[in-house]
Image: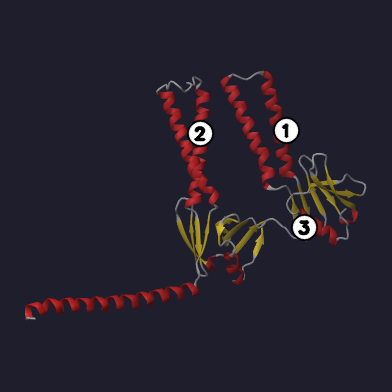
Protein backbone atom coordinates (compact mmCIF):
# COMPACT_ATOMS: atom_id res chain seq x y z
CA UNK A 1 0.00 0.00 0.00
CA UNK A 2 1.59 3.27 -1.09
CA UNK A 3 1.42 6.57 0.72
CA UNK A 4 -1.41 7.90 -1.44
CA UNK A 5 -3.64 4.98 -0.45
CA UNK A 6 -2.59 5.15 3.18
CA UNK A 7 -3.52 8.82 3.72
CA UNK A 8 -7.28 8.38 3.01
CA UNK A 9 -7.41 5.32 5.29
CA UNK A 10 -5.69 7.16 8.11
CA UNK A 11 -7.99 10.15 7.60
CA UNK A 12 -11.07 7.92 7.82
CA UNK A 13 -9.78 6.20 10.95
CA UNK A 14 -8.97 9.53 12.59
CA UNK A 15 -12.40 10.89 11.68
CA UNK A 16 -14.03 7.84 13.25
CA UNK A 17 -11.95 8.22 16.42
CA UNK A 18 -12.70 11.95 16.63
CA UNK A 19 -16.44 11.27 16.11
CA UNK A 20 -16.37 8.58 18.81
CA UNK A 21 -14.57 10.95 21.20
CA UNK A 22 -17.03 13.77 20.45
CA UNK A 23 -20.04 11.47 20.97
CA UNK A 24 -18.57 10.23 24.25
CA UNK A 25 -18.05 13.78 25.52
CA UNK A 26 -21.54 14.82 24.35
CA UNK A 27 -23.10 11.86 26.15
CA UNK A 28 -21.18 12.65 29.33
CA UNK A 29 -22.32 16.27 29.14
CA UNK A 30 -25.96 15.25 28.61
CA UNK A 31 -25.76 12.85 31.56
CA UNK A 32 -24.46 15.69 33.73
CA UNK A 33 -27.28 18.00 32.58
CA UNK A 34 -29.94 15.33 33.20
CA UNK A 35 -28.53 14.69 36.69
CA UNK A 36 -28.59 18.42 37.46
CA UNK A 37 -32.21 18.70 36.27
CA UNK A 38 -33.26 15.71 38.34
CA UNK A 39 -31.60 17.20 41.43
CA UNK A 40 -33.20 20.55 40.70
CA UNK A 41 -36.65 18.97 40.39
CA UNK A 42 -36.18 17.18 43.69
CA UNK A 43 -35.25 20.45 45.38
CA UNK A 44 -37.99 22.68 43.85
CA UNK A 45 -40.89 20.66 42.54
CA UNK A 46 -43.12 22.43 40.02
CA UNK A 47 -46.92 22.51 40.36
CA UNK A 48 -49.45 23.46 37.70
CA UNK A 49 -53.12 24.47 37.94
CA UNK A 50 -55.17 24.71 34.74
CA UNK A 51 -58.78 25.59 33.96
CA UNK A 52 -61.40 22.77 33.84
CA UNK A 53 -61.29 20.89 30.53
CA UNK A 54 -65.03 21.43 30.09
CA UNK A 55 -64.34 25.09 29.28
CA UNK A 56 -62.60 24.02 26.09
CA UNK A 57 -66.00 23.23 24.55
CA UNK A 58 -66.29 27.00 24.23
CA UNK A 59 -64.15 26.76 21.07
CA UNK A 60 -66.61 24.71 18.94
CA UNK A 61 -69.55 26.60 20.46
CA UNK A 62 -67.98 29.98 19.68
CA UNK A 63 -67.14 28.87 16.11
CA UNK A 64 -70.68 27.56 15.60
CA UNK A 65 -72.40 30.73 16.79
CA UNK A 66 -69.86 32.91 14.97
CA UNK A 67 -70.48 31.11 11.66
CA UNK A 68 -74.23 31.21 12.32
CA UNK A 69 -74.08 34.97 12.86
CA UNK A 70 -72.11 35.53 9.64
CA UNK A 71 -74.44 33.24 7.67
CA UNK A 72 -77.48 35.06 9.06
CA UNK A 73 -76.09 38.49 8.09
CA UNK A 74 -75.18 37.30 4.59
CA UNK A 75 -78.59 35.68 4.10
CA UNK A 76 -80.30 38.99 4.87
CA UNK A 77 -77.94 41.09 2.73
CA UNK A 78 -78.03 38.87 -0.35
CA UNK A 79 -81.63 37.67 0.23
CA UNK A 80 -80.92 33.95 0.06
CA UNK A 81 -83.81 32.00 -1.39
CA UNK A 82 -84.12 29.34 1.31
CA UNK A 83 -83.74 31.70 4.29
CA UNK A 84 -86.66 33.75 5.56
CA UNK A 85 -86.07 37.48 5.25
CA UNK A 86 -86.71 39.44 8.45
CA UNK A 87 -88.26 42.81 7.77
CA UNK A 88 -88.62 43.91 11.39
CA UNK A 89 -85.31 45.64 12.17
CA UNK A 90 -85.84 45.38 15.96
CA UNK A 91 -86.30 41.62 15.83
CA UNK A 92 -83.24 41.28 13.56
CA UNK A 93 -81.17 43.34 15.99
CA UNK A 94 -82.24 41.16 18.92
CA UNK A 95 -81.34 37.98 17.00
CA UNK A 96 -77.94 39.40 16.14
CA UNK A 97 -77.24 40.50 19.72
CA UNK A 98 -78.17 37.06 21.11
CA UNK A 99 -75.99 35.25 18.57
CA UNK A 100 -73.06 37.63 19.10
CA UNK A 101 -73.47 37.23 22.87
CA UNK A 102 -73.14 33.45 22.63
CA UNK A 103 -70.14 33.86 20.33
CA UNK A 104 -68.39 36.13 22.81
CA UNK A 105 -69.24 33.71 25.64
CA UNK A 106 -67.69 30.84 23.66
CA UNK A 107 -64.54 32.89 23.05
CA UNK A 108 -64.25 33.80 26.74
CA UNK A 109 -64.64 30.16 27.80
CA UNK A 110 -62.05 29.13 25.22
CA UNK A 111 -59.55 31.69 26.50
CA UNK A 112 -59.95 30.38 30.03
CA UNK A 113 -59.83 26.75 28.94
CA UNK A 114 -56.68 26.99 26.83
CA UNK A 115 -54.71 29.95 28.22
CA UNK A 116 -55.43 30.46 31.94
CA UNK A 117 -52.80 28.73 34.08
CA UNK A 118 -50.94 28.97 37.39
CA UNK A 119 -47.43 27.52 37.80
CA UNK A 120 -45.70 27.57 41.16
CA UNK A 121 -43.14 26.01 43.46
CA UNK A 122 -41.95 26.78 46.96
CA UNK A 123 -40.35 30.05 45.85
CA UNK A 124 -42.30 31.62 42.98
CA UNK A 125 -45.75 31.79 41.40
CA UNK A 126 -46.35 32.47 37.71
CA UNK A 127 -49.95 33.50 37.01
CA UNK A 128 -51.18 33.65 33.41
CA UNK A 129 -54.58 35.25 32.81
CA UNK A 130 -57.09 34.27 30.13
CA UNK A 131 -55.70 37.10 27.98
CA UNK A 132 -52.21 35.65 28.18
CA UNK A 133 -50.91 38.35 30.54
CA UNK A 134 -48.26 36.79 32.79
CA UNK A 135 -47.45 38.03 36.30
CA UNK A 136 -44.87 36.70 38.71
CA UNK A 137 -45.18 36.68 42.50
CA UNK A 138 -42.92 35.44 45.25
CA UNK A 139 -44.43 33.09 47.79
CA UNK A 140 -43.64 35.62 50.51
CA UNK A 141 -45.78 38.20 48.66
CA UNK A 142 -48.89 36.30 49.80
CA UNK A 143 -50.00 37.46 53.23
CA UNK A 144 -53.57 36.06 53.29
CA UNK A 145 -55.44 33.08 51.87
CA UNK A 146 -59.24 33.29 51.97
CA UNK A 147 -61.48 30.33 51.16
CA UNK A 148 -65.13 30.41 50.21
CA UNK A 149 -66.75 27.19 51.44
CA UNK A 150 -63.75 25.29 50.09
CA UNK A 151 -64.96 26.01 46.54
CA UNK A 152 -62.84 29.06 45.77
CA UNK A 153 -59.54 30.39 47.06
CA UNK A 154 -58.40 34.00 46.94
CA UNK A 155 -54.85 35.14 47.65
CA UNK A 156 -53.99 38.60 48.98
CA UNK A 157 -50.95 40.81 49.40
CA UNK A 158 -52.11 42.91 52.30
CA UNK A 159 -55.59 44.10 51.32
CA UNK A 160 -54.94 43.70 47.58
CA UNK A 161 -56.23 40.51 45.91
CA UNK A 162 -53.53 39.27 43.52
CA UNK A 163 -55.20 36.14 42.10
CA UNK A 164 -57.76 33.43 42.75
CA UNK A 165 -58.85 30.03 41.45
CA UNK A 166 -61.82 27.69 41.76
CA UNK A 167 -61.62 24.24 43.32
CA UNK A 168 -62.99 22.66 40.12
CA UNK A 169 -59.73 23.67 38.41
CA UNK A 170 -57.44 20.83 37.38
CA UNK A 171 -53.97 20.02 38.63
CA UNK A 172 -52.22 20.74 41.93
CA UNK A 173 -54.98 22.82 43.55
CA UNK A 174 -54.17 21.87 47.17
CA UNK A 175 -50.36 22.03 47.20
CA UNK A 176 -50.24 25.84 47.28
CA UNK A 177 -52.35 25.82 50.45
CA UNK A 178 -49.92 23.33 52.02
CA UNK A 179 -46.91 25.49 51.07
CA UNK A 180 -48.56 28.57 52.58
CA UNK A 181 -49.55 26.69 55.74
CA UNK A 182 -45.90 25.71 56.27
CA UNK A 183 -45.10 29.42 56.11
CA UNK A 184 -47.66 30.14 58.83
CA UNK A 185 -50.49 31.37 56.56
CA UNK A 186 -53.70 29.49 57.36
CA UNK A 187 -56.83 29.59 55.27
CA UNK A 188 -59.46 32.09 56.40
CA UNK A 189 -63.16 31.43 55.80
CA UNK A 190 -64.90 34.06 53.68
CA UNK A 191 -68.26 32.64 54.77
CA UNK A 192 -68.24 31.10 58.29
CA UNK A 193 -68.71 27.33 58.29
CA UNK A 194 -67.90 26.23 61.84
CA UNK A 195 -70.18 25.05 64.64
CA UNK A 196 -69.41 28.21 66.61
CA UNK A 197 -70.34 30.48 63.70
CA UNK A 198 -71.89 29.42 60.40
CA UNK A 199 -74.32 30.77 57.82
CA UNK A 200 -77.00 28.46 56.40
CA UNK A 201 -78.32 29.65 53.04
CA UNK A 202 -79.34 28.29 49.61
CA UNK A 203 -76.60 27.16 47.24
CA UNK A 204 -75.53 29.72 44.67
CA UNK A 205 -77.21 27.81 41.81
CA UNK A 206 -80.56 28.10 43.64
CA UNK A 207 -80.05 31.86 43.82
CA UNK A 208 -79.06 32.26 40.18
CA UNK A 209 -81.76 30.14 38.50
CA UNK A 210 -84.73 32.47 39.25
CA UNK A 211 -82.69 35.45 38.03
CA UNK A 212 -81.83 33.63 34.78
CA UNK A 213 -85.50 32.75 34.33
CA UNK A 214 -86.49 36.38 34.95
CA UNK A 215 -84.00 37.57 32.29
CA UNK A 216 -85.25 35.01 29.75
CA UNK A 217 -88.95 35.83 30.21
CA UNK A 218 -88.20 39.55 30.18
CA UNK A 219 -86.32 39.06 26.91
CA UNK A 220 -89.31 37.28 25.30
CA UNK A 221 -91.66 39.99 26.58
CA UNK A 222 -89.51 42.68 24.93
CA UNK A 223 -89.37 40.69 21.67
CA UNK A 224 -93.17 40.33 21.60
CA UNK A 225 -93.57 44.03 22.34
CA UNK A 226 -91.16 45.14 19.58
CA UNK A 227 -92.56 42.76 16.95
CA UNK A 228 -96.20 43.56 17.89
CA UNK A 229 -97.00 39.82 17.56
CA UNK A 230 -98.15 39.30 21.14
CA UNK A 231 -101.70 39.10 22.45
CA UNK A 232 -102.95 40.67 25.68
CA UNK A 233 -103.11 37.31 27.47
CA UNK A 234 -99.48 36.63 26.49
CA UNK A 235 -98.30 39.88 28.08
CA UNK A 236 -100.33 39.17 31.22
CA UNK A 237 -98.97 35.61 31.50
CA UNK A 238 -95.36 36.68 30.97
CA UNK A 239 -95.83 39.56 33.42
CA UNK A 240 -97.17 37.23 36.16
CA UNK A 241 -94.30 34.76 35.58
CA UNK A 242 -91.78 37.61 35.72
CA UNK A 243 -93.20 38.87 39.02
CA UNK A 244 -93.09 35.36 40.53
CA UNK A 245 -89.49 34.85 39.39
CA UNK A 246 -88.53 38.25 40.76
CA UNK A 247 -90.17 37.39 44.10
CA UNK A 248 -88.40 34.01 44.35
CA UNK A 249 -85.11 35.68 43.45
CA UNK A 250 -85.56 37.85 46.53
CA UNK A 251 -86.64 34.84 48.63
CA UNK A 252 -83.52 32.83 47.78
CA UNK A 253 -81.10 35.77 48.06
CA UNK A 254 -82.41 36.86 51.49
CA UNK A 255 -82.98 33.37 52.93
CA UNK A 256 -80.26 33.13 55.57
CA UNK A 257 -79.87 31.60 59.03
CA UNK A 258 -76.81 32.79 60.95
CA UNK A 259 -75.72 30.58 63.86
CA UNK A 260 -73.72 32.15 66.69
CA UNK A 261 -74.68 32.32 70.36
CA UNK A 262 -78.25 32.56 69.01
CA UNK A 263 -80.05 31.87 65.72
CA UNK A 264 -80.60 34.92 63.49
CA UNK A 265 -83.13 34.25 60.72
CA UNK A 266 -83.44 36.60 57.76
CA UNK A 267 -86.27 36.37 55.21
CA UNK A 268 -87.32 38.42 52.19
CA UNK A 269 -89.60 41.36 53.12
CA UNK A 270 -89.63 40.23 56.78
CA UNK A 271 -88.01 41.47 59.96
CA UNK A 272 -85.02 39.46 61.18
CA UNK A 273 -85.88 36.95 63.91
CA UNK A 274 -83.66 36.15 66.89
CA UNK A 275 -84.08 32.74 68.53
CA UNK A 276 -82.20 31.45 71.58
CA UNK A 277 -81.30 27.75 71.70
CA UNK A 278 -83.28 27.26 74.93
CA UNK A 279 -86.45 28.40 73.09
CA UNK A 280 -86.17 25.51 70.59
CA UNK A 281 -88.52 22.69 71.55
CA UNK A 282 -87.67 20.15 68.84
CA UNK A 283 -86.21 19.74 65.36
CA UNK A 284 -87.72 17.51 62.68
CA UNK A 285 -86.68 16.41 59.21
CA UNK A 286 -89.71 16.69 56.95
CA UNK A 287 -90.41 15.59 53.39
CA UNK A 288 -93.15 17.33 51.38
CA UNK A 289 -95.60 15.76 48.94
CA UNK A 290 -93.28 16.59 46.04
CA UNK A 291 -90.38 14.85 47.87
CA UNK A 292 -88.70 18.11 48.89
CA UNK A 293 -86.83 17.75 52.20
CA UNK A 294 -86.80 20.35 54.97
CA UNK A 295 -85.39 20.86 58.45
CA UNK A 296 -88.13 22.33 60.68
CA UNK A 297 -87.04 24.04 63.91
CA UNK A 298 -89.95 24.44 66.35
CA UNK A 299 -89.74 27.50 68.59
CA UNK A 300 -91.73 27.93 71.81
CA UNK A 301 -94.66 30.28 71.21
CA UNK A 302 -93.50 31.31 67.72
CA UNK A 303 -93.76 30.21 64.11
CA UNK A 304 -91.36 27.32 63.21
CA UNK A 305 -88.26 28.00 61.11
CA UNK A 306 -88.19 25.99 57.88
CA UNK A 307 -84.86 25.35 56.13
CA UNK A 308 -84.18 23.50 52.89
CA UNK A 309 -82.36 20.25 53.74
CA UNK A 310 -79.79 20.85 51.00
CA UNK A 311 -78.87 24.41 51.92
CA UNK A 312 -75.22 25.24 52.53
CA UNK A 313 -73.93 24.33 56.04
CA UNK A 314 -77.05 22.39 57.10
CA UNK A 315 -74.85 19.57 58.42
CA UNK A 316 -72.88 22.09 60.51
CA UNK A 317 -76.16 23.42 61.94
CA UNK A 318 -77.29 19.90 62.87
CA UNK A 319 -73.98 19.26 64.66
CA UNK A 320 -74.39 22.52 66.59
CA UNK A 321 -77.93 21.58 67.62
CA UNK A 322 -76.62 18.23 68.80
CA UNK A 323 -73.97 20.03 70.91
CA UNK A 324 -76.78 22.12 72.41
CA UNK A 325 -78.53 18.86 73.46
CA UNK A 326 -81.36 19.41 70.97
CA UNK A 327 -82.47 16.13 69.39
CA UNK A 328 -83.20 15.93 65.66
CA UNK A 329 -86.07 13.60 64.76
Crowdedness of circle 1 by 10 Å Cα count: few (<14), some, many (20+)?
some
Alpha-carbon span between mark 3 and mark 2? 44 Å
Q: Which mark is residue 141?
A: none
Residue at point 7%, 78% (across, down): 4
Secondary element under disc 1, as helix, strand or loop, is: helix
* Residue found at the very far front of the displayed protein: 1
Q: Which of 213 and 239 lies nearest the eye of the viewer?
A: 213
Q: Are marks 2 and 1 in contact (CB under 8 Å)?
A: no
Q: Are marks 3 and 2 in contact (CB under 8 Å)?
A: no
Residue 161 appears in the rendering: no
Alpha-carbon span between mark 3 and mark 1? 31 Å
Q: How is the image coloured?
A: secondary structure
Q: Position of residue 65 (x, y in %)?
A: 49, 36
Comes first in the chain, label 3 or label 1: 1
Tell me if residue 27 comes above or below residue 102 in the rendering: below
Residue at point 60%, 72% (across, down): 182
Alpha-carbon span between mark 2 and mark 1? 28 Å
Q: Which residue is mark 3?
A: 316
Secondary element under disc 2, as helix, strand or loop, is: helix
Q: Position of residue 163 (x, y in %)?
A: 54, 57
Q: Position of residue 51 (x, y in %)?
A: 53, 53
Tell me if residue 102 comes above or below residue 162 in the rendering: above
Comes first in the chain, label 3 or label 2: 2
Q: Which residue is mark 1?
A: 244
Residue 177 appears in the rendering: yes
Quadrant in which the N terminus is drawn: bottom left
Comes first in the chain, label 2 or label 1: 2
Q: In the figure, is residue 320 to the left or right of 112?
A: right
Q: Which residue is mark 2?
A: 99
Q: In the figure, is residue 178 to the left or right of 297?
A: left
Q: Position of residue 256 (x, y in %)?
A: 75, 48
Could you tell me how many numbered marks the image carries? 3
Amino acid sequence: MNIKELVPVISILLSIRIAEYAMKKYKEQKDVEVTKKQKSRKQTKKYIITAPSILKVGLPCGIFFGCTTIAFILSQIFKWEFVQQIENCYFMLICLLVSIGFTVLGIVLTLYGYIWKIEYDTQEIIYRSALGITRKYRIEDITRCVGKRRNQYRFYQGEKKIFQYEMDAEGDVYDLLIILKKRGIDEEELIPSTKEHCIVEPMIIRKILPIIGFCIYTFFTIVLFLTRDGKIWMYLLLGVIDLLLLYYSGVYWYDQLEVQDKLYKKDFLKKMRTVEFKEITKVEQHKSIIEKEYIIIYVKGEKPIKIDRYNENVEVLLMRLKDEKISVM
